């Protein structure tokens, strides 16, 4: 049965952007932003980050007591293809950053690795320190503007079900299916059809195109007729957008 929602909720967008983001910094009052080696937004709604053990941030948090210190975790989601403006979205998670007791850090690293097997987690306790960010507010910003999300909604939300394969799909469309992208681009408004078109984002509800024109860059979202529930459904939805449900479109990834 078709769903009425034709776009991810703000909370889902935050979850997906955090999962995609490869660049993150921890900002605390009075010090320069600290690069984060590993970041993970947990199901419980807080975030775990890894920072250099000798960083000012790690020292400040260690001396801040049980209540922690105020901080903002900024995450940048970049497009997985080459475009003029690579930033797709920014997420700001504001709250309190707290120390994780040394005996518990390896166990926490193991919990994170079960969901995010990041190689840098092996360095926890050997140059990297895990910190926990208790989130009090969350904001996501992209070409459409900025939106805040209720923390309780963030706790219950999940990333888009195709989040893990999105980069591979977009790269495949860009490199091997320029004809498919061109067919989909016919649905763009006339004033946007004169630029260079790239597949910028895809989720179960639709496809976003980036149009690079002489007057700047524009993002345009094309919703699917119904949300996709599996890979076959997602491939079929993309081919339907192109106007040909039987096109030999995207291979399985």
Image (spheres, rainbow, N blue to C red):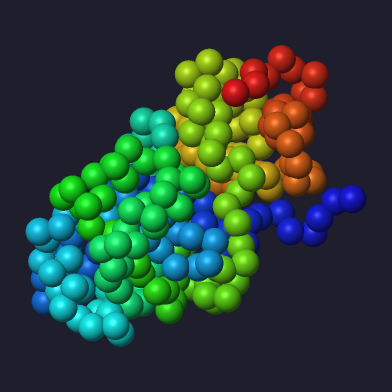
Q: Is residue 217 above or below residue 12?
A: above
Q: Position of residue 64 (x, y in %)?
A: 20, 81
Q: Position of residue 212 (x, y in %)?
A: 41, 37
Q: Is residue 127 above or below residue 178?
A: below
The quarter of the picture where residue 240 lies is top right
Q: Is residue 36 left or right of residue 156?
A: left
Residue at point 28%, 68% (across, down): 101
Residue at point 10%, 66% (across, down): 56
Residue at point 30%, 62% (across, down): 103
Any part of residue 219 in sight: no
The quarter of the picture where residue 51 lies is bottom left
Q: Is residue 20 left or right of residue 4?
A: left
Q: Which of 9 and 56 lies nearest the eye of the viewer?
A: 56
**Where's the C terminus, which quadrant?**
top right
- Residue furthest to the front in view is 103
Q: Which of 209 and 40 lies nearest the eye of the viewer?
A: 40
Q: Position of residue 10 (x, y in %)?
A: 57, 64
Q: Is residue 180 above or below residue 107?
A: above
Any part of residue 201 in sight: yes
The quarter of the picture where residue 152 lies is bottom right
Q: Position of residue 74 (x, y in %)?
A: 32, 62
């Amino acid at each position: 049965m078709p769903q009425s929602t034709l776009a991810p909720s703000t909370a889902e967008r935050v979850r997906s952007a955090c999962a995609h983001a490869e660049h993150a910094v921890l900002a605390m009052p009075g010090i320069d932003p600290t690069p984060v080696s590993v970041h993970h937004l947990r199901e419980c709604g807080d975030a775990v980050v890894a920072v250099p053990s000798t960083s000012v941030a790690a020292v400040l948090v260690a001396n801040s007591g049980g209540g922690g210190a105020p901080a903002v975790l900024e995450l940048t989601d970049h497009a997985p293809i080459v475009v003029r403006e690579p930033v797709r979205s920014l997420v700001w998670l504001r709250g309190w950053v707290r120390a994780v007791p040394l005996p518990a850090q390896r166990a926490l690293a193991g919990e994170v690795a079960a969901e995010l097997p990041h190689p840098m987690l092996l360095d926890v306790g050997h140059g990297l320190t895990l910190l926990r960010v208790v989130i009090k507010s969350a904001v996501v910003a992209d070409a459409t503007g900025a939106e805040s999300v209720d923390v309780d909604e963030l706790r219950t939300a999940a990333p888009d079900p195709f989040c893990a394969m999105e980069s591979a799909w977009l790269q495949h469309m860009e490199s091997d299916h320029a004809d498919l992208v061109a067919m989909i681009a016919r649905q763009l408004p006339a004033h946007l059809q004169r630029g260079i078109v790239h597949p910028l984002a895809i989720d179960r509800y639709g496809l976003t195109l980036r149009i690079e024109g002489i007057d700047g860059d524009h993002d345009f979202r094309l919703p699917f007729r119904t949300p996709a529930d599996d890979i076959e459904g997602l491939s079929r939805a993309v081919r339907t957008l192109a106007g040909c449900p039987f096109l030999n479109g995207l291979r399985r990834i």
